[in-house]
Amino acid sequence: MTFFAEILISLLIVAGGFFAFVGSFGLIKLPEIMQRLHAPTKATTLGVGSVLVASMLYFLIIEGSPSIHELVITLFLFLTAPITANFVAKAHLHEDQHPEALPPTGGEHGWATFDAPPDQRVAGQERGAD
Amino acid sequence: MQLALIVLLPFIGAVLPALMIRAGRNACAIATFTVTATALLILLVQAPRVFAGEVLHFRAEWLPSLGLDVNFFLDGYGFLFAGLILFIGLLIITYARFYLAKEDPMGRFMAFLLLFQGAMVGIVLSDNILLLLIFWELTSLTSFLLIGYWSHLPEGRQGARMALIVTGSGGLSLIGGMLLLGHIAGSYDISVIITRGDVIQASPYYIPALLLILGGCFTKSAQFPFHFWLPHAMAAPTPVSAYLHSATMVKAGIFLLGRLWPALSGTDAWFYIVATTGLATMVIGAWIALFKDDLKGLLAHSTVSHLGLVTFLFGIGTPFAALAGVFHIINHATFKAALFMNAGIIDHEAGTRDIKRLGGLVHLMPIAATMAVIAALSMAGIPPFNGFMSKEFMLEAAGHTAWFGLAFDPTVAIIATIGATFSVAYSLRYIIHVYLGPKRDDYPHQPHDPPFGMWAPPALLVVLVVLIGLFPNTIVGPLLATSAGAVIGADLPYYSLSLWHGLTPALFMSIFAVGAGYFLLTRHSRAVTFRERFYRPEAKEIFDNAVAKIVGWSRTGTWALQNGSLQRYLAAMTGMALIGGYGAYLGASSAPGSNPMLPVPALAVVGWLLLVGACAAVVILHRERLFTLVLVGVIGVIVSLGFLYLSAPDLALTQISVEVVTVILLLLALNFLPKKTPIESPMPIKARDGVLAVLAGIGITGAVYAMLRRDVDSISAFHLANAYGGGGGTNVVNIILVDFRGIDTYGEIIVLGIAALCIVALLDTAMQGASGRRIANWQVDMRRSADRHPLLLVVGTRVMLAFALVVGAYIFLRGHNDPGGGFIAGLVVAIALIMQYMASGFAWAQRRAGLDYHSVIGWGVLVAGLTGVASWLFDYPFLTSWFDYITLPIVGTFEVASAIAFDLGVFLCVVGSVMLALSRLSRVGRIAEHLDVAEGPMDVDPSLHPNGPPSETRPTSSVAAQ
C-alpha cells in the first residue's frame, strides 16, 4: 500500500515538475503575448495542481493525517490565476493594439478596454477612452 | 504643602480667566484677582513662622535619578520676593482691567499673567536648582507671550523675540553654571549650596561656574552689555512693563545674585565682575534715560540703571552692601511700579508718551501728578521718601569700597555719585517736563484723571513710598531684617533705618548729586547736542545683524544637509554610520570568533543569487521606475524567505505584508512621476555614492560575520526564559512587543499614527497653492483604460475579502502563542481592504466602508493606552500585562490575556494609518486625473442588464459586456 502510494506521489510530483517546466519554457519560447499567456496560467496551474494533489496524498496515506491546506491553495490559485491572466490580456490590448485592428466583438459594443457601454459611461472614462 | 500650593495656584488658576472671560471682563479680572489673592493669603499665613527665623520646606520626589525634585523652601528672602510678586501682581491685575481696551483679548492676557506669576513664584521658592532652572525658562517663555501680547504690532513681536533670545541664551548659560555649581557643592539643593561657600570658592570650577551663572543673571536683569533688550520690551502693554520691570522678570537675575550671594560672593573675581558691571550699568542706564523722550523708554533705562545699582551693591560683597541691595529691591519695586502705571495713565489719557509733546499736565491730572511727583522724587533719592534711604545706603557702601585696594580710593564713590546725579536729572525731568510748565493745547487727547480703578493701584504704592520713608522701622524693618538676614546668613551688620544719619560723606554726595542733577536738567538741550556729537552704537541694529548672520549660517548649514535631495540624505546618513562604525572598529578587537561555520545548502545559494541579481539589476535599471519597483518586490520576497529560512516566521509574515502594502502605495505615487528617471547625478556623485555603498556593504558584512562567529550575550536568553512564565505566551516576539517592551510599542504606534497624519497634512497642503495648481493641471501621460474596474477583479476581490478577513482575525488571535499578532493582522486586513479599493476605486469603496480612518487611529492609540492604564487599577505599573486560564464547558481551557486588548490597539493603528495614507494618495490621483467618483462597483456590470444591454437592435447572440 505504502509503496504504491509512494509511486503515485512520485509520479504526481514528476508530472507537476514537468508541467511547471513546460510553463516556464513556453513563457520564453512562444512568440506572442497572447500565446505566452497560456503557458503560465494553464500549464503552471496543472503543475502546481499535481504537486498539491501529491501533497494531500502524502499527508493522508504516509503521515496518516488529512491535510486541507492544499484545497485552500487551490482555491486561491483558481481565484488569482484568471484575474492575472485577464489583466495581462487587458494590458496587452491596451498597450499594443489599436481598437481598429481587433476583430469585432460580435456584440453591439466594442472591447471593454476601449469602449464602455454608453449607459455606464461617466465623465472620467470618456477622457480615458480613445 | 502650602509652599507647593503657592506656586501651583497661579498655574492651575490660569485656566480660570480664559474661561471666565465669557462671563465678561469684570468676571475675568475678579477670577484672576482671586487666584493671586489666595496665593498671597497662603503666603502671608506663613509670615509669623518666617519672621521667627524658621525656614519652611516642602519636598517631593519628581525625577530623583536626575536629581530633579520638587523642593521648595521659604525663608525671609524668598518671602520678600514672593510677597512682592503676588502683591504687585494684584495691583497690576486691577490696573490692567481698566487699562486694556475692549478689543484686547483680556482672558488671554490674564492667563499669561498668571502663568508668568506662577513661574516667578516658582523661581523664588525653588530649593532644587534644576527646578529653579525650569521655572527660569518658564519666565522667559511666558514673558515672551506677555511682551508680544499685542502681536499685531511689529515692535511687540520684535521686542518679544529679542527678550526671548537674550534671556533664553542667558538661561542656557545659567543651566551650565548651575550644573557646575551643583557638582561642586555635591548637592542640587540651594539651601545646602549656600552653606558650602568655602568649598565652592576653593574649587577650580568656581570661576567657570561663576561666569556662567552671571551670564544668566546679567541677561535676565538687563545688565550692561545685555541691557538693550529691556527698552525694546517696552512695546508691551503698560501693565506688563510695570509688572515685568519693576518687581518680577528682571528682578529674577537680581534675586539669584542675592540667593547665591553666600556661596559665591567675597572673592576678587566676584567683586570685580559683579560690582563693575553693576556700576557701569547704573551710570550708562541713567545717562541714556536722561535723553529718552518716550516715557516708558525713560523708565526702562532707569530700571536698567537701578538694577545696576542693586547688582553693584551685591557685588561689593560686604554684608552691609547686601542689606542695602535688598532694601533697594523693596523700594525700587514700589516707586518703579507706580511710575510705570503712571506712564500708562498718561499714555491712556493724553494719547502720547512723548515727553516733547507733554507738559503742564499737573493742571489737568492732579491726582496722577501728585503720585508721579512723589514716586519720581523717591526715585531721585530725595527725602523723606524711601528711595532716599536706600540711595544713602548705596552711597555709604560705595564710599567704603576701594577699587584698587588703596587706603584712599574714591573711584567707586565718584562714579556712584555721577550715577546718582544722572538719576536725579532724569527723575526730575519726569516731573518737570511732563507735569510742570505751561498747559498746552495740542495733546492728542484731552487729558484728565483716570478712573479710580486705574489710579488706585499706583496710589497704594505711593502711599507705601511715603510710609516707608517716614516710618521705615515700623513698615519694613522686620521684613528687611529677615530677608537680608536670609541673604547674608550671618548676623546682620549695624545699620539704622532713618532719614537722618548725621553729616556723613553719603549725605554730601547726595546733596551734590541733587544739585548737579538739577543743574544738568536745566542744561538738558545742551546736553542733548553734546551727546549727538558722539557715535553711539545702536543695540537693536547690532542685535538684528547678529541674528541675521546666525540665521544665515544656520541656513547654509541646514541647506548643505537638507536640500531636498534624498540621495544626499542617504549619503550623509550612510557616511555618518560608516564613520561611527569605523570608530567602533578601531576601538575594539577584530579577531575572528570561534563559532563553527555552517554548511551552505543549495536553497540558500539560490536565494542569495536571486537577491544579488535583483540588487544588481536595480542598480543597472534604476531609471526604469516601474521595473525597479518589481525588482524591489523581488528583493522583499527573498528577504522574507530569508527570515523564514532563519526561523523568524513573525518577521517573514511582517516583511511580506509590508512589502505588499509598500508596493501598492509606491505604485500610486509613481503614477504622478515621470515613468523614467532622468539622469540626475553627475559622475563624481555617482562615484561618491558607489564608494559609500561598497564601504557600507563591506562594513555590514564584516559586522555580521563578526557577530555570528562569536557568542553574544544578549537579552534574548532572558526573553526566551520568561516569555511563557511572565507574559503567558509562547510567541516570544509577540510577548516582547506587547509586554516586555510594551511601552516602546505604544510609542511606536503613536509615531505610526502621527506619520499617517503627517502624510495627510503634507498631501492636503500639496493640494493648495502652486503645487495644487500643478496637480490640477497635470496631463494624463498614459492612455486610460475604459474598463478601469473590471468585473473579474471586482468579483474575485469580493470573494477574497471574506477569506482575508478571516485570515486576519486568525493571525490576530493566535499572535500570543504563534507567529502573528496585531501588527501583521493589521497589515493583512489593510491589504484585504486595499484590494477592494483597487478593484472598485477608492472613493466608491470608501463610501461603502464608511470608516473614518482618522478615528480608527485615534481609537487604536486610545485602546492601547487604556489597556496600559487599566493596570493602574490593580496597583501595577503602566502596561503590566495580565493573563489567566479559564475553563469553560465544551470550549475547554483557554488563555485570557490583557495583552490582546493592547494588540487590538496596535491592530487598529496599523489599519488606520495604512488606509489613511492610501486614501490621501488616491485623492490626489482623483484630482489630478479629474475623475468623478465611480457610480457603481465596476465599469461594466452585467447584473444591471441581465438580458444584455437595453438596446432595440440587440443581436441575439450578444455576450453583453463580457
Image: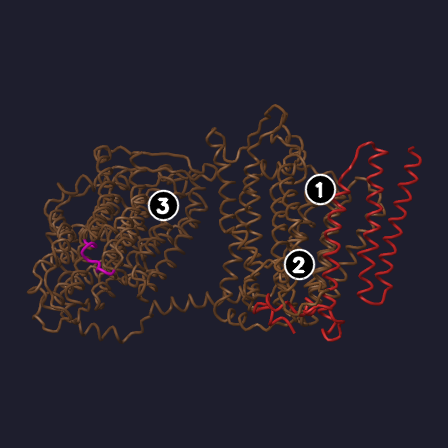
Chain colours: A red, B brown
Mark with earlier residue (1, 2): 1
Cα separation, mark 3 vs mark 2, equals 85 Å
Look at discs 3 and 2 and give the one toward the viewer: 2
Figure disc tally: 3
Q: Quadrant of residue B372?
A: bottom left
Q: Residues within 10 Å of mark 2 (few under 14, many from 20)?
A: many
Compare residues B487 and B814 and report the one nearer the observer: B814
Asked whether disc 3 touches disc 2, contact meaning CB atoms under 8 Å apart, the reply is: no
Q: Which residue is mark 3?
A: B264
Q: Which residues are magenta?
A: B95-103
Q: Which residue is mark 1?
A: B649
Compare residues B540 and B842 and report the one nearer the observer: B842
> For residue B100: magenta?
yes
Q: Which residue is mark 2?
A: B791
Residue type marked 3: Leu
Cα separation, mark 1 vs mark 3, equals 64 Å
Q: Is residue B315 visible?
A: no
Q: Left of B753 or right of it: where is B311?
A: left
Q: Position of residue B666 (x, y in %)?
A: 64, 60
Mark with earlier residue (3, 2): 3
Mark with earlier residue (1, 3): 3
- Secondary structure, mark 2, is helix
Q: Residue furthest left?
A: B363
Compare residues B923 and B94 and report the one nearer the observer: B923
Reply above or below: A50 against B816: below
Q: Residues within 10 Å of mark 3 (few under 14, many from 20)?
A: many
Cα separation, mark 1 vs mark 2, equals 35 Å
Q: Position of residue B646 (x, y in %)?
A: 75, 43
